[in-house]
Amino acid sequence: MADSITLLNVLRDTLRTYLTDPYTYTVPANQARDGTYWIFGDEPANSAKYPMIQILKLTNPTVPISIGPVYWEHEQVFANIWFYSKNGFSITVNGTTYKNAQVVEYYLGKIKTTLKSKFLDMCDDGARDYKAMDTTPVGYNSETQLYFGAVTVRVRTFHT
C-alpha cells in the first residue's frame, strides 16, 4: 500500500535514476554527481551543491470512494519539484547554451518529460497516476544569487 511518503519517494527516486545531472554538460562524465547528491525529497537539503532539485509536498487530500468499515480511498499527493541554479551557471546541450533562468526553464521541462516517460515504472512502484499540473515562472533571489522554478505535480494511489 502506497502512502504519501512512498509517493514522494517514487518521484524522487525516478528523477534520481533517470534525470541527467546538469554537471554532465560542464565536466567530464566521471565527475557527475549521483542523484542522491543533487535531488532531494521532502527533507532538509543542507549539504546541497547547486544546481539542485528539492521536492516539497503541498497537500495530501484523500477521498473515500466506497462505503463500509473497510472503505477504499483515493489518495493524492500534490508537490512542487523545485529546481535551483546559481547565477552564472550554464550548460550546452546539443549545441544550444542555456544560462541562468534558461537552465531552470530547461530543467523544468526535463523534469516533466522524464516523469511522464516513466509513468508505467512509477505505477509499478505504487504511484498509480502522475500528472504535471503547472509550472511556475522562473524567479531570481539577488541575496542568494539563485534562479529557481517549480513544476507542480500530482501523484495518486488507491487503497483500503
Image (cartoon, helix red, strand yellow):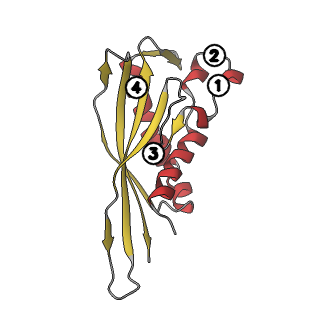
- Alpha-carbon span between mark 4 and mark 1: 18 Å
Give the label, 4 or 3, closer to the camera.
3
- Vertical placement of 21 versus 142: above or below? below
Decide which of tag 3 and tag 2 comes sooner along the chain. 2
- Alpha-carbon span between mark 4 and mark 2: 18 Å
For label 1, the residue is: 32
Residues at badges 4 and 2 in contact (C-beta under 8 Å)?
no
Question: For mark 4, does the 10 Å Cα neighbourhood hold few (<14), some (14 to 19), or many (20 or more) residues?
Answer: many
For label 3, the residue is: 42
Residues at badges 4 and 3 in contact (C-beta under 8 Å)?
no
Question: For mark 2, does the 10 Å Cα neighbourhood hold few (<14), some (14 to 19), or many (20 or more) residues?
Answer: few
- Alpha-carbon span between mark 4 and mark 3: 20 Å
For label 4, the residue is: 104
Q: Looking at the picture, how far across and down is residue 15, in whole percent?
A: 53, 42
Give the label, 3 or 1, closer to the camera.
3
| Quarter of the image where the C terminus is located | bottom left
